[in-house]
Image: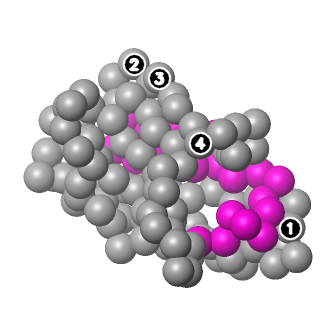
Amino acid sequence: QVQLVESGGGLVQAGGSLRLSCAASGRTFSSYAMGWFRQAPGKEREFVAAIGWSLGSTYYKDSVKGRFTISRDNAKNTVYLQMNSLKPEDTAVYYCANQGGPTTGWGGWGQGTQVTVSS
């Protein structure tokens, strides 16, 4: 089982930047991919970005392409989400999650980190 802890959220003005971190511990060698999700008030949780743990392939929600970058540091068992050109609609609680295999679901959800973008 993988345990995940997110950090790096905060309050930023529109157009600003934040970098989120997700530190993984436990059975990290069993991870297939890591992902970032977000949930805004009154909305369902949605996919934001993902990265393959071994090959580093990346995937993004269309609305964040060109603004967000997901990366990983295998030595530190940490995944990052660099968020640039932030918009008020990016305001949400951001969560990271682990995928154990190509056909398994996401799990190991962290406690989340709040990102608030003011206009």
Task: Find out whether the residues at labels 2 and 3 contact each other: C-beta distance under 8 Å.
Answer: yes
**Can you tell which mark lies on residue 57?**
3
Q: Is residue 55 magenta?
A: no
Horizontal side of 53 relative to 32 (left or right) equals right
Q: Quadrant of the C terminus?
A: bottom right
- Which of pointers 4 and 3 indicates the residue nearer the eye? 4
Nearer the N terminus, badge 2 or badge 1?
Answer: 1
Q: Residue furthest top?
A: 55
How far apart are labels 2 and 1 at the CA level?
33 Å
Label 4: which residue? 61
Residue 40 higher or lower than 90, as above or below = below
- Which of pointers 2 and 1 indicates the residue nearer the eye? 1
Nearer the N terminus, badge 4 or badge 2?
Answer: 2
Task: Find out whether the residues at labels 2 and 1 contact each other: C-beta distance under 8 Å.
Answer: no
Label 1: which residue? 14
How far apart are labels 4 and 3 at the CA level?
14 Å
